[in-house]
Amino acid sequence: MKSENVEYKEGSTVCEGFAAYDEAAKKPGVLIVPEWNGVSDYSKKRAQMLADLGYSAFVADIYGKGVRPSTMEACAAEAGKYRDNRPLLRARVRAALDTLRKLPGTDAGKIAAIGYCFGGMTVLELARDGADIQGVVSFHGALNTPNPADAKNIKAKVLALHGADDPLVPPPEVAAFEQEMRDAKVDWQLVAYGNAVHSFTNFTIPEGTPGPVSYNKKADQRSWVAMQDFFKEVLH
């Protein structure tokens, strides 16, 4: 397996993502959009886990090379720039998708995108932008969008993996997402994991952490299996 940092551009902005893939064969590609802190050891580990499962994995750099916020305030400020400018967010994730397609180990005709938290919101926007990919998976991502009618553009199958007790993605937001998917007749699924809050897959956060974010080992393992089952359907 090869793993490397990969520079690419969106417009005039230089970005630096991370790739993990088998050079010897073309494998289905999985784009990974990280949490609001951007490309990190955690997202790189997920890429390596996906490569071990037989995928060509690429971590998208939404913020640009060297922009790696490290405090809650800096993460919120950086993520907010893209949350409040969905066309820019879509352009950045499209550039990463194009880069994944060009990796030597990627079967460009079989692509899925997954995202965590901020990244979950991003891959749903990629789908709403009409990206020609087979599936998207949101792990504890924001489900809202300023333009619900854009769901009519969705070509991908959609899987949303949600913490049932996530205070950052409250029930009205979940209900609005479900209605958006129904109205657009999308092939969609939403799985809610009991006793799980925001960031339930992030094993760098201690389990049982009080507040809105905490790791939940059961929900992490169950959601990873759900993603693999989804990939068996859409990528194989």
Image (cartoon, helix red, strand yellow):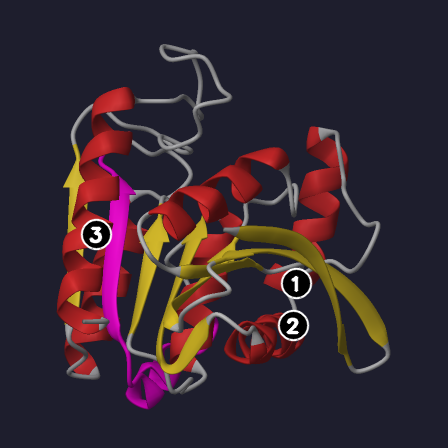
Residues at marks 2 and 3, CA–CA distance in whole angstroms? 26 Å
**Percent of width and height locating residue 21:** 49, 58
Please give the range of residues in magenta: 145-164
Q: Which residue is mark 2?
A: 92
Q: Is residue 145 visible?
A: no
Which amino acid type corresponds to the residue marked 2 in the rendered image? Arg
Contact, mark 1 vs mark 2 (Cβ under 8 Å) = yes
Asked if 130 appears above or below 181 in the picture, the reply is below
Which amino acid type corresponds to the residue marked 3 in the rendered image? Gln
Element class at badge 2: helix
Q: Considering depth in this image, is 164 or 187 the residue closer to the camera?
A: 187
**Percent of width and height locating residue 98:** 57, 80
Residues at marks 1 and 3, CA–CA distance in whole angstroms? 29 Å
Rate crowding at label 2 as few (under 14), some (14 to 19) or many (20 or more) other CA atoms within 10 Å: many
> Who's the residue at 33% across and 29% down the image?
197
- The disc placed on residue 82 is 1
Q: Nearer the viewer, mark 2 or mark 3?
A: 3
> Who's the residue at 21% across and 24% down the image?
218
Q: Considering depth in this image, is 222 or 228 the residue closer to the camera?
A: 228
Which amino acid type corresponds to the residue marked 1 in the rendered image? Tyr
Rate crowding at label 1 as few (under 14), some (14 to 19) or many (20 or more) other CA atoms within 10 Å: some
Asked if 37 appears above or below 95 in the picture, the reply is above
Q: Which residue is mark 3?
A: 228
**Percent of width and height locating residue 235:** 23, 71
Q: Earlier in the sequence, mark 2 or mark 3?
A: 2
Q: Nearer the viewer, mark 1 or mark 3?
A: 3
Side (left or right) of 143 relative to 182: right
Whether 190 is among the magenta residues is no
Element class at badge 1: helix
